[in-house]
Image (cartoon, rainbow, N blue to C red):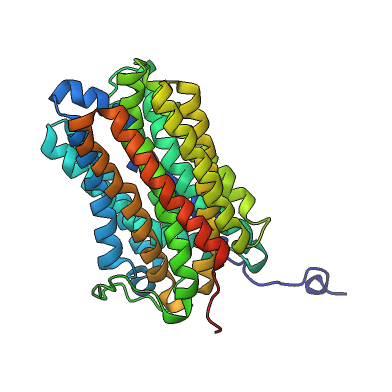
């Protein structure tokens, strides 16, 4: 027997690339930067002297960036490839952090939030699709959870990190953004190692804005799922834009770490809700998520009336659980129903509806605060969103989402 027989040549080893978990980590890092300022708005208010309405308008500028990006280039990663879009999103996240580090007053706050919104808009579509496409067939369910968990988990880690650093470390308006810049640099390296999942990318192709594009065969799934997402994201908007002011002004709690934990608890509950979705059919998860969301909103309203932090946390956890349950069910249904060539565009349209929910109602709360105060404005908000969530749940119960045949 020859030496070659004893040791058969297998050829050069195949290159190994990071998988869907690495892509999910990049997604989470990018999304964490979008909520870093949440517990810091009180410090900015003291420094710059603006109103609660201005806080919500600054917050809304982020949502404007998200929606504009999704409408204009939401499908661009389908053409140029996932990696260039992810790198662009991380570059915008870094530029946003630089704006906050400059501390140049309201103009730079608006610029930072707008850039953050542009980054989130790119990540919402391209990040979600990249995680799903890097998974092997037997990993699809776990990858779907990883994508939505990276989205919500990243959004929750931003306030937690910023609150802890601002409360217990020096330079509260500087250190959180320096830490984020370092994590973005690591994420860029990971993206460069990821394989490209678009078969024939055209890096120099010009964007072709799709607007709100939903293929006809997906609309039976898309409409009810997006309605539930709108209601759930309205609750997230309340906690990221208004809850910090309620904690500091109404409850007289000045510990920024507490504010960060309160907001983090909502997104953690959302992630937990998403983990339950795979154990039940979409037709069950969507209306059940709306029902739990209604219960959470009732607790939030009770906390505003009684001025009790435990009720606020309980409402956030319950509402986040329902939001996560409905959100992942809707996103999975839409992603599975969408044809591959239009998957990013369809998912981007889904996020447009969701981010309309996270922004428009919250600005209304900020405006209403100027006339009736924060507590009454919050109660009005929760009542309206409760009606919306209850209506969405009833609709989904009576008319479960059904995709058109392929």
Question: In this orientation, which residue lies closer to the viewer: 73 or 242?
Answer: 242
Give me the residue at 18% from left, 32% from top.
Answer: 371
Q: Is residue 380 above or below residue 394?
A: above
Give me the residue at 52% from left, 58% from top.
Answer: 394
User: Residue 64, image x and y in percent?
Assistant: 23, 53
Question: In this orientation, which residue lies closer to the viewer: 24 or 19?
Answer: 24
Give me the residue at 23% from left, 48% from top.
Answer: 115
Q: Quadrant of residue 73?
A: bottom left
Q: Is residue 159 above or below residue 136?
A: above
Question: In this orientation, which residue lies closer to the viewer: 108 or 41?
Answer: 41
**Is 201 on the left-hand or right-hand side of 299?**
left
Q: Is residue 37 visible?
A: no
User: Residue 364, image x and y in percent?
Assistant: 24, 43
User: Residue 31, image x and y in percent?
Assistant: 39, 46
Q: Is residue 197 visible?
A: yes
Q: Quadrant of residue 89?
A: bottom left
Give me the residue at 42% from left, 65% from top.
Answer: 347
For the C terminus, the quadrant is: bottom right
**Is 302 on the left-hand or right-hand side of 8?**
left
**Is 91 on the left-hand or right-hand side of 299?**
left
Q: Is residue 219 above or below residue 168?
A: below
Total number of numbered discs in the rendering: 0
Q: Residue furthest right?
A: 1
For the N terminus, the quadrant is: bottom right
């Amino acid at each position: 027997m020859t030496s070659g027989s004893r040791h058969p040549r297998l050829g050069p080893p195949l290159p190994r690339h990071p998988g869907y978990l690495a892509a999910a980590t990049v997604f989470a890092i990018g999304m964490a930067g979008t909520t870093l300022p949440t517990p810091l708005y009180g410090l900015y208010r003291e420094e710059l002297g603006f109103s609660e309405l201005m806080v919500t308008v600054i917050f809304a500028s982020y949502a404007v960036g998200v929606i504009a990006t999704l409408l204009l280039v939401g499908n661009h990663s389908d053409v140029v490839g996932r990696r260039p879009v992810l790198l662009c999103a991380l570059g915008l996240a870094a530029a946003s952090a630089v704006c906050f580090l400059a501390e140049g007053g309201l103009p730079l706050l608006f610029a930072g939030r707008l850039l953050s919104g542009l980054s989130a808009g790119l990540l919402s579509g391209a990040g979600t699709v990249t995680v799903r496409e890097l998974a092997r067939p037997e990993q699809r369910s776990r990858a779907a959870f990883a994508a939505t968990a990276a989205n919500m988990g990243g959004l929750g880690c931003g306030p937690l990190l910023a609150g802890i650093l601002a409360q217990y470390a020096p330079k509260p308006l500087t250190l959180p953004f320096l830490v984020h810049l370092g994590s973005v640099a690591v994420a860029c390296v990971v993206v460069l190692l990821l394989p490209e999942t678009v078969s024939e990318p055209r890096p120099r192709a010009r964007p072709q804005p799709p607007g709100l594009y939903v293929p006809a065969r997906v609309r039976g799934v898309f409409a009810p799922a997006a309605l539930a997402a709108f209601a759930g994201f309205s609750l997230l908007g309340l906690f990221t834009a208004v809850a910090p002011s309620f904690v500091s002004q109404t409850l007289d709690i000045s510990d920024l770490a507490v504010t960060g934990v309160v907001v983090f608890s909502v997104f953690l509950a959302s992630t937990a809700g998403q983990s339950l979705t795979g154990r039940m059919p979409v037709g069950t998860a969507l209306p059940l998520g709306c029902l739990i969301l209604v219960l959470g909103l009732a607790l939030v309203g009770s906390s505003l009336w009684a001025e009790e932090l435990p009720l606020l946390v309980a409402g956030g956890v319950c509402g986040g659980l329902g939001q996560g349950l409905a959100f992942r069910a809707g996103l999975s249904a839409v992603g599975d129903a969408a044809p591959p060539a239009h998957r990013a565009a369809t998912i981007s349209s889904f996020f447009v509806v969701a981010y309309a929910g996270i922004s428009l109602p919250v600005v209304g709360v900020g405006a209403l605060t100027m006339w009736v105060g924060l507590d009454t404005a919050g109660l009005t908000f929760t009542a309206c969103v409760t009606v919306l969530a209850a209506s969405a749940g009833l609709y989904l119960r009576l008319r479960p989402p059904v995709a058109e045949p392929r």
